[in-house]
Amino acid sequence: MNEVIEKLGRTGIIPVVVIENTADAVPLGKALVRGGLPCAEVTFRTAAAADAIRILKKEVPELLVGAGTVLTKEQADQAEEAGVSFIVSPGLNPNIVRYVQEKGIPMMPGVCTPSEIETAMELGIKEMKFFPAEAAGGLKMIKALCGPYRDVLFMPTGGITAKNAGDYLKYEKILCCGGTWMVSPALIRDGKFEEIKRLTAEAAEIVKEVRG
C-alpha cells in the first residue's frame, strides 16, 4: 500500500474542507494538527483551493494535504503544482484517473456501484471513495459490495457524522472516512478555529476508541 494511503488509514477521519479565503488556510491547518487529525482534503469548489493548498504545504508542513472534487485535467495540474499528496474525485472518470496516475499522485475516485468498482479495479485502484455514502446505502451497502469485491478499501464520504463515524471505522474494509462536520464552511468563514480544534479532537478520539 502506498505510504500516503497508509497515512490516511492511520488518521482515520479526513477533514474535507472548503476554503473561500486563503487567509484562513494556516489557522485552519494548525487547528487540525492541534486537534489530532493532521490531514486535510481541500476541495476544488472555490477559486482559492490551489493557493490554499500551496500555503498549507509551506506553512503547516506536518499536515498531509490533498485535493478533493478534482473533475478536470486542469484542476489536476493545479493540484500537482500546489504540491498535493493525494487527489480525490466525487466520481469515476477513467481519463482523469489515468492522467493523475501518470503524475504519480495517489488517486481515489468516487464509486457507489459494482460497475464503477470494477472499472476502478481495472485501472489498478484498490482504495476508493464511496460517495455519497449515506445516500447510497451507507455501511450496509458497503458491506454488501465487499462480498464480491474483497480486495477493495473504501473512504466513505457524504453524510458521515460524529454519530456514525465510529460504526464505519469498525468495519475492516473502511480505510478512513471523509467528514465535514468539524470544518464546516461557516466555522471557517467565521474564524472559529478553536471550535474547529475542539470538534477535531472529538473526531480524533472516535478514531482512537475504535482503532486504538
Image: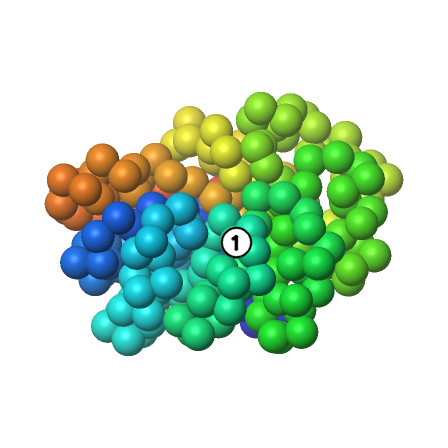
Position of the N terminus by quadrant: bottom right
- Find numbered disc 1 in the image and state the secondary structure of the residue it sits on: loop
Q: Nearer the viewer, residue 134 or 189?
A: 189
At x 62%, y 66%, the residue is 100
Q: Quadrant of residue 132?
A: top right
Q: Is residue 208 visible?
A: no
Query: In the shown orientation, is residue 202 left or right of residue 140?
Result: left
Which residue lies at the image location 57% right of the left edge and 44% below the top edge?
90
x and y percentages locating residue 176 in the rendered image: 54, 48
In percent of width and height, residue 108 lies at: 61, 55
Image location of residue 128, percent across then percent down = 65, 50
Mark 1 surroundings: few (<14), some (14-19) or many (≥20) residues within 10 A: many
| Residue at (58% x, 24% y) in the render | 135
Q: Nearer the viewer, residue 183 or 24?
A: 24
Q: Which residue is mark 1?
A: 70
With 201 as the anchor, is 102 left or right in this view? Answer: right
Q: Is residue 188 visible?
A: yes
Q: Residue furthest front?
A: 74
- Pick whichever, 135 or 153, lies toward us: 135
Residue 16 screen position, x and y as percent = 40, 46
Q: How is the image coloured?
A: rainbow
Q: Quadrant of residue 171?
A: top right
- Looking at the image, residue 207 sits to the left or right of residue 21; the answer is right
Residue located farthest toward the right when viewing the structure as drawn: 148
Q: How many marks?
A: 1
- Asked if 167 appears above or below 19 in the picture, the reply is above
Amino acid beneath label 1: Val
Residue at left 40%, top 63%? Answer: 65
Measured along the vertical axis of the image, is residue 127 above or below residue 45? below
